[in-house]
Amino acid sequence: MRHTAAVRRALRAAAADLPAGTDAVTVGVSGGGDSLALVAAACAEGFGVRAVVVDHGLQPGSAAVAARAAATCRDLGAEAEVVAVTVDGPGEGPARDARYRALGRAARGPLAVGHTADDDAEGVLLGLARGSGTTSLAGLAPVTVDHPAVAAGATLLWRPLLRVTREQTYGSCAELGLDPWRDPHNASPDVLRSRLRHEVMPLLREVLGEAVGANLARSARLLREDDDALRALTPTPGPGPLPVATLAGLPAALRRRTVRAWLRGRAGALTAAHLGAVDALVADWHGQGPVSVPWPSTMDAARRADLRLVVARRDADLVLDEQPRKRHV
């Protein structure tokens, strides 16, 4: 039972990240090996476990898969329920957003999810390929409070299995006689992360050695420490106009972080290009026009269609404003 022991050790160590006295958690369950191993370990370690299985309804038979996963969790000693969601749009992003909103609404206290060291390593590679900065390359945090699931109702998002591998979680399921569901999307060549998992990572292990996944995950942890330090040095702006003087004396890394913090919750996901263009309003000001930034996902479609969200420089301040979209006739 060495894999099961490794998963339980990781969970015990990660429990130090929870608020004192936490004795119950909600676990987001897909029916795959990571989440089933997490439910089994949490039950074995004495947590009161409430398993929530999200049925996205994206595949034939998904309701049966979800019901089977919930039954397995009950057999392990957890409470379990199935929550059906409607996914607005194609791709991984809308499904993920719907899932976390549902999990957050269903959570009672901390929400635990089964991300492993392999997920962390894959995230680092994706971040490198996209030219991401420290925050993205820092990978997955053990505890997150700035997350859609928390906004929806969970007290925090907890990832207790970041020190174990997918081999260990699936190995634990085998030792416990569990039969995890294998999501066909995870083997689809049309899904980027699937190709990374099944094509890129095996090649990296062949060329660089079996430890490459663990090494990438370690790099993520080290970068997370740097990211935490930079976050602590970043000014906390209010929701009103952002004085240029506040930004002008900061190093570029802190300027961009301050802008990101200022726009958090009021704009959508910001890319390096967005942040660079806003930064130029301070560091390379020559009278240029406003910078378009994404609307938050909560904004209604009609408003997004009629207006664009912009950051503009007005006198000595940066301001967030709305402007009518130009209509082509």
Image (cartoon, helix red, strand yellow):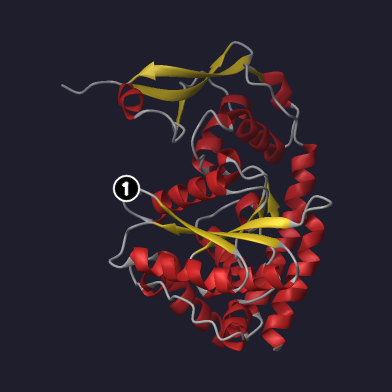
Q: Secondary structure at mark 1?
A: loop
Residue 29 seen: yes
Q: Find residue 3 and report its horizontal and vertical position in percent.
A: 68, 84
Q: Residues within 10 Å of mark 1 (few under 14, many from 20)?
A: few
Residue 31 seen: no
- Determine the image quadrant of residue 231: top right
Q: Find residue 10 and report its horizontal and vertical position in percent.
A: 74, 71
Residue at left 75%, top 61%? Answer: 222
Residue at left 80%, top 50%? Answer: 19
Q: Is residue 34 above or below residue 267?
A: below
Residue at left 66%, top 20%? Answer: 244
Q: Nearer the viewer, residue 297 or 253?
A: 297
Amino acid type, mark 1: Gly
Residue extending furthest toward the top: 315
Q: Nearer the viewer, residue 82 or 249?
A: 82
Disc 1 target residue? 89
* Left or right, 200 with reference to 135: left
